[in-house]
Image (cartoon, grey):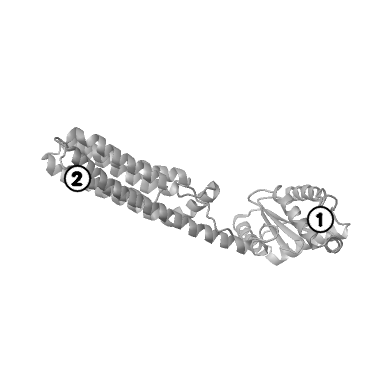
Amino acid sequence: MGNTIPINRLGEFANKELETQYWEKHIKKIKKLIQGMVLLSGIVYFSIFIYDLFYYGSFVRALPSFISRALIFCISVVLFLVSNRVNNNRHYTLLISFYEICLVFSYFFILYEQRAQGYFQQGMVVIIFFLLIFLIPNRWIYCLITSAAALLVYFILTPFYIEKLQLFDIIEALIYQFIVFALISFYTFRNNFLQRTQFYREEQLQLLTITDELTDIYNRKKFDESLDEWISFAIRNNAVFCVIMYDLDDFKKLNDTNGHLAGDQTLVACANVVKANIRLMDVFARWGGEEFMILLPLTQLNNAADLAERLRIKISEIRIKGSISFTASFGVAEYRKNESRDSFLDRLDKKMYEAKQSGKNRVAY
């Protein structure tokens, strides 16, 4: 495990797959919090209409404010209801950013309609927007863009409805808001970095517990866990799966003749060939020594046997140190419903030894 954490300047993992994995786990933990914050902000924002009603003195004059606040409230309710159905994390964070942008523009629309005074008071509300935007968990870059947009609208729009605004007031407000903007941006960036650092280290530690150090594939522990999961799934859902077991032929002789380094190179080369020819969903593991297992979800026996035959040929074509060749014997079995784990593995093991006893470099199923 390296000491360098692969995080880019946006406070995200440089590896997109790793970033996706982070968000999948992170969103599951905080989705209810995000839903609650969005709904609560919508309710609070709509309830401020009571103040607008007193400010205008009549409902007719306050109607634009009512419509604008009601629209934001409706958006917050919709997001609260549909967010659990949004599985794409990028879409989810974009929806949150869309809601925040709508909230900002709604607020300034109401101010423009009211021709409200109080430049610094409105500046404080912008700071509150900063806090809301950065506190609702989202991509840091989206928070940065949304907050910058709120600040830009504030400085462009307010001079149109606030009379006798002095340049000194604008500069003073800009200094205060930039300080808050910079501080909260730095804090959330650092928080993102620390969260991803912790996630990365936890993932690395977990990976070490389920990975074979030599071949960099899964170890027996991971295979056993996956097999138990698929047996349970097959029983509940009447699903089919197969397992391929293979063993390198005459591996001890290869080790004794060419040395243990050549033996290790053989195991690594064999594992690399198999990894390149199976699906991402398949579970490939070193069972022990020169024995390997491949769990094939949702795969029937004839398809698994065809794959084993292709792998047998590709393994026989490998050459170590330019001239050392080797072969493997394969056993293939399809899980039978309600079959015990031990019974299934015993049947698979017998198939593999059947291939050995039939002359090696064969597939038995």
Q: Position of residue 294 (x, y in %)?
A: 70, 55
Q: Select label 1 or label 2 by which is in front.
A: 2
- Circle 2: element type: helix
- Above or below, 45 against 161 in this view is below
Dot 1 corresponds to which residue? Answer: 328
Q: Position of residue 304 (x, y in %)?
A: 73, 50
Locate residue 28: give its quadrant: bottom left
Q: Residue furthest bottom?
A: 342
Query: Can residue 264 be seen here?
Result: yes
Are discs 1 and 2 less than 8 Å apart at CB? no
Crowdedness of circle 2 by 10 Å Cα count: few (<14), some, many (20+)? some
Q: Quadrant of the C terminus?
A: bottom right
Query: Can residue 340 be seen here?
Result: no
Q: Nearer the viewer, residue 20 or 119?
A: 119
Q: Residue furthest top?
A: 160
Q: CA distance from mark 1 to mark 2?
A: 78 Å
Locate residue 107: give its quadrant: top left
Dot 2 corresponds to which residue? Answer: 120
Identify residue type, mark 1.
Answer: Ala
Q: Nearer the viewer, residue 351 or 174?
A: 174
Crowdedness of circle 1 by 10 Å Cα count: few (<14), some, many (20+)? many
- Above or below, 80 against 232 in this view is above
Identify residue type, mark 2.
Answer: Phe
Q: Left or right: where does residue 196 sit relative to residue 148? A: right
Q: Position of residue 148 (x, y in %)?
A: 33, 41
Q: Position of residue 88 (x, y in %)?
A: 48, 45
Label count reads 2
- Circle 1: element type: strand
